[in-house]
Image (tube, rainbow, N blue to C red):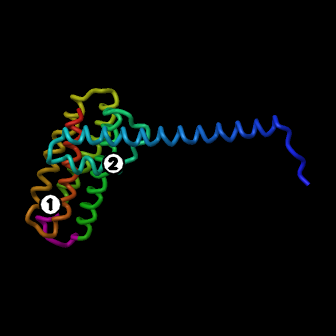
């Protein structure tokens, strides 16, 4: 049989349970407030990028891991990370197209090759831009990205009208859009 607990032990247990519930409620409210504030920040920042980029900005930054992000600076770092992943994935996609079309059209092969070079260069410069952004050298971020963006735009334009390359063109457009979002944040 269970022995009855002394009143002090009951009071202590009740106090501990109430304390744990209070902590759980406070943590839940803080997390909800942080989620709301990051969503508000994303909307605020993305609406400044203009109609051309606002939707992709909101979709991409909302889906990204924004843990610990509390300001525009943190959101900019997230944007650079996302752009780098997209540029790298698009470069891998273009490289796969080169291998697929190994014995094919030399003009297409040149387009693929130029795109891969441009995207690889942009990926490297996004890494440099991340460092420059973290030290608040925003002018260097612009320098890091501008030339490569023109090359990726040229890749996208080269793919335009070639049905086989429509997905590559679309992916390049996304990379360009996201890189422009970064430039808008600097």
Q: Residue at x 32, y 36 (%)?
A: 130
Q: Position of residue 60 (x, y in %)?
A: 30, 50
Q: How crowded is mark 1: few (under 14 residues within 10 Å), some or many (20 or more)?
A: few
Q: Residue at x 35, y 51 (%)?
A: 63
* Quarter of the figure with the N terminus: bottom right
Specify the quadrant of the image occupied by residue 127: top left
Drawn side of residue 85 relative to residue 16, left or right: left
**62 in magenta:** no
Specify the quadrant of the image occupied by residue 41: top left
In this rendering, the count of numbered labels is 2
Q: Name the residue under label 2.
A: 62
Drawn side of residue 173 relative to residue 135, left or right: left
Q: Position of residue 98 (x, y in %)?
A: 23, 65
**102 in magenta:** yes
The region drawn magenta spans: 101-111
Q: How crowded is mark 2: few (under 14 residues within 10 Å), some or many (20 or more)?
A: some
């Amino acid at each position: 049989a269970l022995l009855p607990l002394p009143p002090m032990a009951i009071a202590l247990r009740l106090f501990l349970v109430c304390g744990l519930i209070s902590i759980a409620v406070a943590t839940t409210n803080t997390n909800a407030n942080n989620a709301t504030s990051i969503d508000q920040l994303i909307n605020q920042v993305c609406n400044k990028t203009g109609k051309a980029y606002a939707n992709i900005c909101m979709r991409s930054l909302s889906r990204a891991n924004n843990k610990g992000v509390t300001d525009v600076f943190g959101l900019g770092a997230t944007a650079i990370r996302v752009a780098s992943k997209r540029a790298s994935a698009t470069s891998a996609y273009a490289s796969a197209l080169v291998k697929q079309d190994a014995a094919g059209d030399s003009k297409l092969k040149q387009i693929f090759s130029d795109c891969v070079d441009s995207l690889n260069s942009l990926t490297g410069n996004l890494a440099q831009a991340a460092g420059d952004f973290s030290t608040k050298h925003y002018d260097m971020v612009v320098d890091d990205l501008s030339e490569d963006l023109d090359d990726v735009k040229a890749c996208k334009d080269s793919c335009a009208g070639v049905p086989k390359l429509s997905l590559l063109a679309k992916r390049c457009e996304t990379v360009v859009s996201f890189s422009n979002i970064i430039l808008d944040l600097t």
